[in-house]
Image: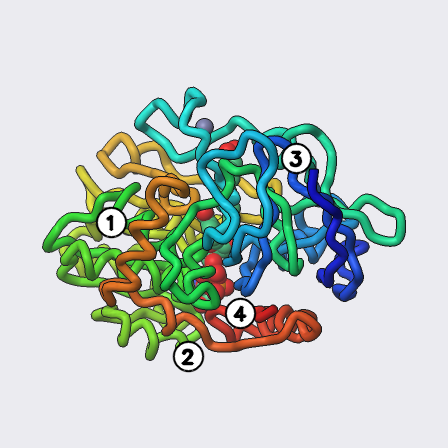
């Protein structure tokens, strides 16, 4: 068996406390696991959300990060789908290919390691991280804010070696999520009218999906008008700032679209906006897809008549993408210049400055920051 590596990682000892760059011991991968040298990681809201103590199931001390890119350093016993030197994107939704979910042909929500992953542990019920004699927990099964991390082999997608990891790491969450929700989950049709609520990374990626699906009208909605310019470059055809309307945004949308939109996407995580996103849909066929993750305990509501009269409420996790089998193809799209990634990157930080990256995220001025190792 391999040796423990000591490396730098951003450890979060307690909710709301700043990250501390520590020397962390990363154990060798056990059976069915791989150890990956992380080269870059994006910063996503879910990290900030759990860091902020908003996730009641958050476990500390922990190493956050789930939008990474790296190179396989070593593999454990019995690993067959990944080899040393492979370039990989960690997957917070694994793909075992064998469970009820994976074989259903209906969902990407592989559930074989769901319980251990939710407890911040590897599938055998232990952690691979230690610092100052203490166990440090994994986050989302990925923990990419570390120079080395250990993942189950089912939780890495092997991608082509010529793809820049410091860019395509973003395909490990935000971009694939918005883009896939449009193409895999909602299946937006040519000529459609679409409303995208929230023009952050996820909303922008949804716009890219809508453009690829040849939607006719792509209406972007955000309370921060600074977001409109980039959304326009991405293909959004119209904009709404709901704070400047004299009626509810759903009513306004129904009025300007001759009865409602064909498809809508909630890319914020606000339950009131989720309602608006459903209710702006066209009677008889409008489909609204929830992508945003709402605060713990929040509930959605609408009048059931909205559904009785043919509107459909859906949800999408990681864009419905099966990571191991489908992420390599999404990387190809980027390499063939048919999917934007670089344009999402607004800020870059070194690992030692990770607290600044979270500060920038909270200010709302970033689309995506990359942490470079
Ligand atoms: P972001 O903060 O960059 O973007 C959110 C945007 O919504 C911002 O531009 C903000 O100004 C806007 N906004 C906020 N309140 C609004 C309101 N009331 N009306 C209109 N616009 C409003 O976030 P992001 O990284 O794009 O992520 C969006 C959401 O998607 C988050 O909830 C995130 O947790 C979630 N997410 C879900 C998945 C999944 O698999 N389902 C994956 C990644 C992220
Ligand atoms: O299989 O029960 C399950 C949960 C799978 C994880 C789904 C995560 C979707 C949203 C997470 C936001 C990522 C930033
Ligand atoms: Zn599975």
Q: CA distance from mark 4 to mark 1?
A: 31 Å
Q: CA distance from mark 4 to mark 3?
A: 29 Å
Quadrant of the rendering where the N terminus is positioned: top right
Q: Quadrant of residue 306?
A: top left
| Nearer to the camera, 349 or 203 | 349
For label 3, the crowd category at 10 Å Cα-Cα, with few meaning under 14, some 14 to 19 and many 20 or more, is: many
Circle 2: element type: helix
Q: Residue at x 44, y 34 (%)?
A: 95
Q: CA distance from mark 2 to mark 3?
A: 47 Å
Tell which circle, 4 or 2, labels the residue nearer the N-terminal end: 2
Circle 1: element type: strand
Q: Quadrant of residue 40?
A: bottom right
- Mark 4 touching mark 2, by CB under 8 A? no
User: Which mark identifies residue 370?
Assistant: 4
Tell which circle, 2 or 1, labels the residue nearer the N-terminal end: 2
- Nearer mark to the viewer, of 4 and 1: 4
Instruction: Judge whether 148 appears above or below 77 on screen.
Output: below
Tell which circle, 3 or 1, labels the residue nearer the N-terminal end: 3
Mark 3 C-beta to ligand 3 under 8 Å: no
- Mark 3 touching mark 1, by CB under 8 A? no
| Nearer to the camera, 117 or 52 | 117
Q: Residue at x 54, y 51 (%)?
A: 72
Extreme-left residue of the structure: 191
Q: Which residue is mark 3?
A: 30
Circle 4: element type: strand
Q: Position of residue 348 (x, y in %)?
A: 54, 76
């Amino acid at each position: 068996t391999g040796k423990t590596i000591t490396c730098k990682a951003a450890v979060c000892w307690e909710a709301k406390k700043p990250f501390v760059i520590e020397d962390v011991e990363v154990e060798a991968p056990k059976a069915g696991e791989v150890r990956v040298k992380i080269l870059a990681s994006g910063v996503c809201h879910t990290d900030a959300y759990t860091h902020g103590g908003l996730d009641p199931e958050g476990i500390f001390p922990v190493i956050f990060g789930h939008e990474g890119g790296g190179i396989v350093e070593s593999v454990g016993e019995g690993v067959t789908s990944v080899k040393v030197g492979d370039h990989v994107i960690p997957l917070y939704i694994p793909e075992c290919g064998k469970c009820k979910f994976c074989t259903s042909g209906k969902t990407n929500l592989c559930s074989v390691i769901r319980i251990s992953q939710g407890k911040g542990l590897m599938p055998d019920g232990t952690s691979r991280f230690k610092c100052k004699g203490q166990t440090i927990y994994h986050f989302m099964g990925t923990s990419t804010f570390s120079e080395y991390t250990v993942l189950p082999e089912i939780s890495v997608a092997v991608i082509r070696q010529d793809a820049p990891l410091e860019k395509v790491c973003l395909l490990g969450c935000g971009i694939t999520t918005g883009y896939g929700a449009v193409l895999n989950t909602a299946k937006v049709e040519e000529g459609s009218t679409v409303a995208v609520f929230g023009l952050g990374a996820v909303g922008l990626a949804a716009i890219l999906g809508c453009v690829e699906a040849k939607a006719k009208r792509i209406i972007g909605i955000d309370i921060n008008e600074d977001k409109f310019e980039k959304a326009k470059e991405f293909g959004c055809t119209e904009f709404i700032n709901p704070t400047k309307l004299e009626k509810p945004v759903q009513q306004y949308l129904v009025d300007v679209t001759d009865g409602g939109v064909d498809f809508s996407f909630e890319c914020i995580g606000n339950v009131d906006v989720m309602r608006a996103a459903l209710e702006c849909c066209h009677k008889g066929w409008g489909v609204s897809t929830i992508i945003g993750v709402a605060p713990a305990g929040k509930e959605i509501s609408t009048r059931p008549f909205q559904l009785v009269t043919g509107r459909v409420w859906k949800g999408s996790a990681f864009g419905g993408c099966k990571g191991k089998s489908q992420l390599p193809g999404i990387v190809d799209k980027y390499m063939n210049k048919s999917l934007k990634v670089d344009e999402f990157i607004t800020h870059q930080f070194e690992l030692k400055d990770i607290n600044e990256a979270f500060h920038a995220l909270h200010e709302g001025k970033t689309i995506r920051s990359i942490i470079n190792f």
